[in-house]
Structures are given as structure tokens and as C-alpha cells.
Amino acid sequence: MRVLIACEYSGTVRDAFIAQGHDAMSCDLLPTDRPGPHYQGDIVDILRDDWDLMIAHPPCTHLAVSGAKHFAAKQVDGRQAAALDFVQLLMDAPIPRICIENPVSIISTKIRKPDQIIQPWMFGHEATKTTCLWLKGLPPLVPTNIVGKGARHVTKSGKSLPQWYNLPPSADRWKIRSATFQGIADAMAAQW
């Protein structure tokens, strides 16, 4: 099966599909973190290249409800509308099986509700990271290894965050936080 992993620089999901014997390629504006088939450029360039399955991870910066305090400015300057248009472009791609992955976001109210909500702890990682899946032509993922929900950290402001999410400021903190957990990638590759 020809599999496109859109908006992925890490290679995690791509490599999980390759390990299952699929012809998989990642695509992102950034270079790949791991050697492997990767198109560095605009997804629009390759979106119509006869794929059997696409798993897309569109940037959540202007969509995630965790950043709701910034929504007004993003609506005024058009960043949020552009992000929603990009998600709709991916959803409408001429590919028979599609999964759009994103955190809890305005996609649910502006486009449609997700077909499934998963957590890393359902796939062998003691962590919480609410992840929504919008599916086309695919069944919901079946949990593979349910474990504990992991430690939490309470910030100075009293907000409770997953321990893995509480990282000190760094240049690549956003990359670490946005990465797909390996157990989820493996489940996608094995089940889809």
C-alpha cells in the first residue's frame, strides 16, 4: 500500500508503516529527523500522486483550544482561517483512506467533530495527550496496551499538566510535544 504521512518531520509514523512492509513516505516543510523516504516541500505538490492512505498531522498552532486566548488575534489576521482551509484541503484529498490527527481544536466546531479520541495510555505509554482523529474510509483504532495514565505536574499557576509535557524552555520543545507516540504509530500501521 502507498502511504503518505503528511506534515511529519519525525519519521515515526512513516517508519512504523515501512516496518509493516508498506511503501510509505513522509512530507513536511522541515527536513526529516530520521533517514528515510521524505519529501521536503509543500504537500500540495504530491497530494494527488495516487496514494492509498494518508495520515496527516496539520499544524495545530492556530487551531488547538490550548491556545484559545490567542484566537481573537488569529481570527482577525486570517491565520486561523488559513489553518482551517489547510485541514479541509487535507480532508478533501483524492485519497480513499484518510486520518487527520490533531489535539482538541476548533476543527470540531468549524468543520466537524472527530470520529475518535485516543490517548497514549491506550497504546502502551503512561501519558495523557488527548488526540482527535478525523477518519475517512478507516475504522477507529483499537487500543493495543492499556496502561496507567502517567504522572502529572502542577504548575505555579495551579494548572495540572502531564509530566512528559512539562519541559523546560528549549528550541525544540515544540517538536517534542508534537511528536506522535510510538505505540500510536505502531497501532496505525498494524491496523490500517
Image (cartoon, grey):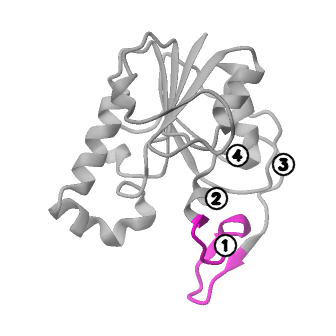
Residue bearing the label numbered 3: 147
Circle 4/circle 1 CB separation < 8 Å: no
Residue 142, x across and y down, in percent = 70, 29
- What residue did someone put label 1 on? 167
- Mark 4 falls on what kind of element? loop
SS under mark 2: helix
Quadrant in the picture for residue 89: top left
C-alpha separation, residue under disc 2 versus residue under disc 4 = 10 Å
Work out how far the residue at label 4 is from the one at label 1, CA to CA, in angstroms: 16 Å
- The amino acid beneath tag 1 is Leu
Determine contact: label 2, label 1, CB under 8 Å. Answer: yes
Horizontal relation, residue 54 to residue 118: left or right: left
Q: Name the amino acid type tagged 2.
A: Ile
Q: Is residue 74 above or below residue 29?
A: below
The numbered mark, 2 or 4, whose residue comes first in the sequence reads 2
Q: What's the amino acid at mark 4?
A: Phe
Q: Residue at x 69, y 40 (%)?
A: 34
Which disc, if any, is residue 181? Answer: 4
Whole-percent x and y of residue 90? 37, 30
Vertical relation: 78 (above or below) 54: below
Q: Could you tell which of marks 2 and 1 lies nearer the N-terminus? A: 1
Instruction: Point out the tag, 3 or 2, that comes first from the N-terminus.
Output: 3
Q: CA distance from mark 3 to mark 4?
A: 14 Å
Using the image, tell me which numbered label, if any, was put on residue 176.
2
The mark nearer the N terminus, 1 or 3, is 3
Sequence-first disc among 4 and 1:
1
Residues 70 and 143: in front is 70
| Residue type indicated by callout 3 | Val
Give yes or no for contact between labels 2 and 4 (Cβ–Cβ under 8 Å). no
